[in-house]
Amino acid sequence: MIVYNVRCTKDHVFEEWFDSMADYDAKAAQGKIVCPSCGDRKIVKALMAPNVTGGAKAPAGPCGGPICASGCALAD
Ligand SMILES: [Zn+2]
């Protein structure tokens, strides 16, 4: 399962859970995502990275923290 921050045409942002990115695409195309504030069905993804769940944490980098997008600054 993944959660996206999505936004309607009136700039209401809310979280919505999907099975996968394809699930989001299908529901968005079919107008099945409804804004809880105004009932708008024209939904787009808000500019926020999806949070992937499942219990597993991000793999640790050489410094012991999550691997940085551009590589671990503390790596050799
Ligand atoms: Zn709305």
Image (cartoon, grey):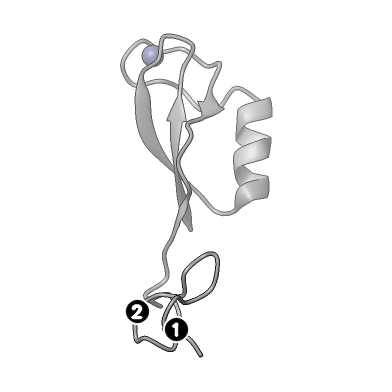
Which quadrant holds residue 25? top right
Which quadrant holds residue 74? bottom left
Question: Which residue corresponds to the image point at 68% horizontal and 27% vertical from the top-left?
Answer: 29
Three-letter code for the amino acid on which mark 2 is drawn: Gly
Give the residue pinned by disc 1. Answer: 61
Give the residue pinned by disc 2. Answer: 65
Question: Which residue corresponds to the image point at 48% horizontal and 54% vertical from the top-left?
Answer: 2
Q: Is residue 31 above or below residue 50?
A: above
Q: How many marks?
A: 2
Question: Which residue corresponds to the image point at 36% horizontal and 10% vertical from the top-left?
Answer: 38
Q: Position of residue 62 (x, y in %)?
A: 43, 89
Q: Are marks 2 and 1 in contact (CB under 8 Å)?
A: yes
Q: Is residue 66 left or right of residue 1?
A: left
Ligand 1 shown in quarter: top left
* Badge 2 density bin: few <14, some 14–19, many ≥20, Cα 10 Å: few
Which residue occupies the foreground of this view, 38 or 9?
Answer: 9
Task: Find the residue positioned furthest to the left.
Answer: 37
- Element assignment for label 1: loop
Three-letter code for the amino acid on which mark 1 is drawn: Gly
